[in-house]
Image (spheres, coloured by chain):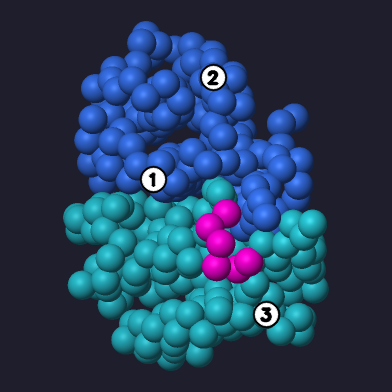
Chain colours: A cyan, B blue
Amino acid sequence: MSTAISPNEQVAQVILPAELLAHWQGHRTLTRKVIEAFPEKDFFEYSIGGMRPFSKMVDELLSIAGPGIQEIVTGQQAAFTEEVYHGNSKSKVLELWDETTEKIYANWTKIGVDKFHEIIKLFGQYEGTVQSAILYFIDNEIHHRGQGYVYLRSLGIEPPMFWERNEL
Amino acid sequence: MSTAISPNEQVAQVILPAELLAHWQGHRTLTRKVIEAFPEKDFFEYSIGGMRPFSKMVDELLSIAGPGIQEIVTGQQAAFTEEVYHGNSKSKVLELWDETTEKIYANWTKIGVDKFHEIIKLFGQYEGTVQSAILYFIDNEIHHRGQGYVYLRSLGIEPPMFWERNEL
């Protein structure tokens, strides 16, 4: 007797691939709003306690999300680099952000549910399951965005609500 | 022909319940280290940009995690309160933190895999699936902990590394 599960059959799961995608993109939508909330100059220059300006943290996020999902899907390792070419223009950063959004959508459909426990060595350095890598991408973004919230508050700017994850 | 899945059978999933538990507790271990890194006085008083001191954020985390997991398991709604009785003692906060850790472990085993898509109304207010509630608990903790990192850096204190999620 076969125990194979039809892909259309609903299997009890913690989180479905489509839900994890929506969760990630929801967080990315909120981060986009935080980028928008920064005055142009402060986005590239403002800093607390010797930390990076928020733009540098966003460079890191851009360097992880797009190349990360691409490596997960293609298996082709690329060295990690945080060099992002935006010429210190916030609108260019937002353009790159939206391109990454599309890249994530386009690649996600290529990740089968059985892929999430495959072991990969991301950027030739970070070994773990695909699911742990994706959760790391999301967690790392929340972490740095939380820091961006402090920058904004310290600049007297009210950040977007934490639960505002839907596109306008 | 039966399509029922034996609980011992490995089903392709994004993340297993035990993995999500380890993920959550790993984050909580890191947050505990961040609490420890704060000087006693600064933990309760230091603030940037009119935000809450880190202790108040930790009160929120304590008010969510333990009561939240308990409500998920028992179905008994309790009103949300951020009143945590620690008498402004960091060691008492850490004690409450560890009690919550145990409460999460004890309750987790009572959450079957089919429970994660049940719709609940947490604290009588927040409607959604169990999985979305638990992800919210984790995300909210990462968010506020990221803010604690800025407080620490601004105090000249080096926070623990973001990926230090294992107990010492």
Whole-percent x and y of residue B52? 29, 35
Contact? badges 1 and 2 (CB < 8 Å):
no
> Residue at the location (74% across, 57% down)?
A3
Query: Few, some or many C-alpha atoms within 10 Å of disc 3 (few <14, some 14-19, many ≥20)?
Result: some
- The residue type indicated by label 2 comes to Lys
Secondary structure of residue under mark 1: strand
Does residue A30 sit above or below A15 in this rendering?
below
Of labels 1 and 2, earlier in sequence is 2
In-image side of A102 versus A38 (left or right):
right
Counting labels gives 3
Residue at image mark 1: B129
**Quadrant of the image containing the N terminus of chain A:** bottom right
Secondary structure of residue under mark 3: helix
Residue A105 drawn in magenta: no
Residue at image mark 3: A73
Residue at image mark 2: B103
Q: Main secondary structure of the magenta part?
A: loop
Marks 1 and 3 on same chain: no
> Residue at the location (73% across, 62% down)?
A4
- The residue type indicated by label 3 comes to Val
- The residue type indicated by label 1 comes to Thr
Q: Depth check: B122 or A4 in front?
A: A4
Q: Depth check: A132 or A62 in front?
A: A132
Q: Which residues are magenta?
A: A6-11
Query: Few, some or many C-alpha atoms within 10 Å of disc 1 (few <14, some 14-19, many ≥20)?
Result: some
